[in-house]
């Protein structure tokens, strides 16, 4: 069996590595990895692939820095050529990036079977490009690998019970990854305050809106007076703050340089609380039993809100401050296995082999 895996960003490589390891255990699968280059990442050096035990891509399309339309169009053209040359049995895509959608469209138009890992996620916010990507990808997929029962329920509500697609609850490959890599966690080479809150801000809906960004950082400054906040600052977020004359020298926040995956695991594990606008970090907080304040109005991981491990604060300064205080004192139960048993990659490969 030949499978073409399409990825476009560092987190997708981490997810794909889980399934690649499961393929290697089974044997008899020829996997061809295509990196679209969507998110240029200087950290994806030889060391990254060696330390993370991740296969290097067979193709690097080097498509990045363009508008959504231009990037998706160029990816579609180049992925189509790869698929025609490789003639795989399956195309495997992950998540909700432009790379995901381009891979899905290319496979669909060439009538190659398509499997979507992280299918069925919904934030119900069509202003998010990720929401559009995941909905369209699900619609043309033959095999929908759903990480949670919520994801299955979302698809059933959309009529997938009457469509020629197979829905499989697999658990979450990121939980597999967290279990695999936790022993490699390492402290960042920088000084950190005691009992810190870990925060990340990078999503365009926050960084590109001056009102929202100002409100978020006003709240973080206030919180930092009594509870130290540590932010590994994304270069794009830093540039926007500098453009808006943010007074770094007077800030109570501890800003550090971006960190690698192993350092981020350490930071999450040793934090009192997580604050983020990232989708993945909301789950990673749960994996190590940390409560989370999400700086968005919606989340695709609604089960975290329902179980009380996560709250949605949006970009309202007062709400962020009050919910942070609440979460610091809240007693939370992390015993429910929301994201599977750590064998999601194996379940995915079994399904691909059996269908």
Image (cartoon, helix red, strand yellow):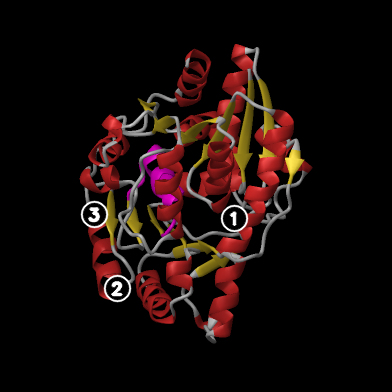
Q: Is residue 280 depicted above or below 145 in this figure?
A: below
Q: Residues within 10 Å of mark 2 (few under 14, many from 20)?
A: some
Q: Nearer the viewer, residue 213 or 102?
A: 102
Report the residue marked by disc 3.
329
Q: CA distance from mark 3 to mark 1?
A: 45 Å
- Looking at this view, name the residue that lies furthest to the bottom: 245
Q: Is residue 281 magenta?
A: yes
Q: Earlier in the sequence, mark 2 or mark 3?
A: 2
**Rendered residue at 48%/23% (across/down):** 348
Mark 3 or mark 1: which comes first in sequence?
1
Q: Which mark is residue 316?
A: 2
CA distance for labels 1 and 2: 33 Å
- Frontmost residue, 175 versus 153: 153
Left or right: where does residue 31 sit relative to residue 182?
right
Query: Please, what is the dominant secondary structure of the magenta stretch?
Result: helix
- Quarter of image, res 73: bottom right
The magenta region covers 277-291
Asked if residue 238 is among those painted magenta in the image, a careful observer would answer no
* Residue 223 at x, y percent in the picture: 35, 70
Mark 3, Cα crowd under 10 Å, few <14 / some 14-19 / many 20+, is few
Residue 15: % across, % down: 54, 36
Left or right placement of residue 62 versus residue 17 in this view: right
Q: How many marks?
A: 3
Per the image, label 2 sits on a secondary structure element best described as loop
Q: CA distance from mark 2 to mark 3?
A: 20 Å
Label 1 sits on residue:
72
* SS type, badge 1: helix
């Amino acid at each position: 069996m030949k499978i073409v895996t399409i990825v476009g960003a560092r987190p997708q490589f981490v997810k794909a590595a889980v399934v690649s390891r499961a393929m290697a255990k089974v044997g008899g699968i020829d996997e061809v990895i295509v990196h679209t280059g969507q998110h240029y990442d200087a950290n994806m050096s030889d060391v990254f692939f060696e330390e993370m035990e991740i296969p290097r891509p067979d193709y690097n399309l080097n498509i990045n820095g363009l508008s959504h339309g231009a990037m998706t169009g160029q990816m579609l053209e180049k992925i189509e050529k790869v698929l025609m040359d490789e003639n795989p049995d399956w195309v495997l895509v992950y998540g909700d990036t432009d790379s995901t959608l381009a891979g899905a469209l290319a496979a669909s138009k060439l009538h190659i079977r398509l499997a979507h890992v992280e299918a069925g996620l919904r934030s119900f916010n069509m202003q998010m490009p990720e929401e559009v990507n995941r909905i369209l990808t699900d619609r043309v997929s033959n095999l929908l690998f759903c990480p949670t029962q919520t994801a299955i329920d979302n698809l059933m509500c959309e009529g997938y019970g009457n469509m020629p697609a197979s829905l499989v609850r697999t658990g979450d490959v990121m939980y597999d990854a967290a279990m695999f890599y936790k022993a490699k966690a390492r402290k960042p080479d920088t000084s950190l305050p005691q009992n810190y809150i870990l925060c990340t801000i990078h999503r365009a809906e926050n960084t590109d809106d001056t009102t929202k960004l100002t409100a978020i950082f006003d709240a973080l400054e206030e919180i930092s007076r009594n509870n130290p906040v540590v932010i590994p600052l994304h270069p794009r977020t830093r540039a926007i703050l500098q453009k808006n004359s943010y007074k770094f020298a007077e800030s109570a926040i501890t800003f550090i340089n971006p960190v690698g995956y192993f350092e981020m695991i350490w930071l999450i594990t040793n934090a009192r609380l997580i604050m983020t606008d990232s989708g993945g970090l909301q789950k990673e907080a749960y994996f190590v039993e940390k409560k989370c304040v999400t700086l968005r109005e919606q989340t695709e991981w609604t089960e975290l809100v329902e179980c009380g491990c996560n709250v949605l604060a949006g970009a309202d300064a007062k709400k962020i401050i009050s919910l942070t205080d609440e979460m610091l004192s809240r007693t939370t139960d992390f015993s429910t296995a929301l994201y599977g048993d750590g064998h999601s990659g194996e379940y995915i490969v079994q399904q691909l082999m059996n269908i």
